[in-house]
Amino acid sequence: MPEDAAPGHEERRPARKRSRPRSRLQRLRAQFGEDFQPEMPPLQCGDHLLHYLEQAGPTAGDDPIGHPELQAFQVNTGIVLTEWEASTLRQLSKALLAESHRATDPNCPAPWDAAREAQVLKALSVRDAMRNLATM
């Protein structure tokens, strides 16, 4: 306490500004450079839906995209979505939003497991080989 301070009054430190936790991607970009893009798992199909989701806007603020946004997307682009595509886009938007909230944890693992993916692909190739043998 400074000598000229009144008794009973302690010196206050300036309040520390609380910053939002950095996402895993932000930490990786700080470490490896701003152009860093993490490796993503390969798509087997449906990549057109990801393109549509990007065009429509993956979320509506802090909410998943809704039917009004999908209707506007269809009117503005001339793309007619099937019921399945519209439902899938809404599910993708919800999953993206949930993962973005989950990813604020600094220890959040990647949303896929490369070892598990390799097991699934191996099982699928064995299954396909068995089917080919059965049709001979």
Image: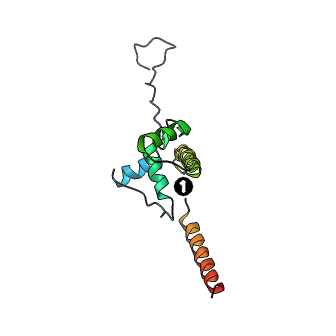
Q: Is residue 116 left or right of residue 53?
A: right
Residue 35: percent from left, percent from top:
33, 53
Mark 1 falls on what kind of element?
loop
Q: Quadrant of residue 17?
A: top left
- Residue shown at 46%/60% (left/top)? 40
Residue 44: percent from left, percent from top:
51, 65
Query: What amino acid is labelled 1 in the image?
Result: Pro
Residue that badge 1 annotates: 109
- Identify the image quadrant of the N terminus: top left
- Identify the image quadrant of the C terminus: bottom right
Vertical comparison of 104 with 61: above or below: below
Residue 126: percent from left, percent from top:
61, 79
Residue 70: percent from left, percent from top:
51, 41
Q: Is residue 103 left or right of residue 34?
A: right
Vertical comparison of 37 with 61: above or below: below
- Residue sitting farthest toward the top: 6
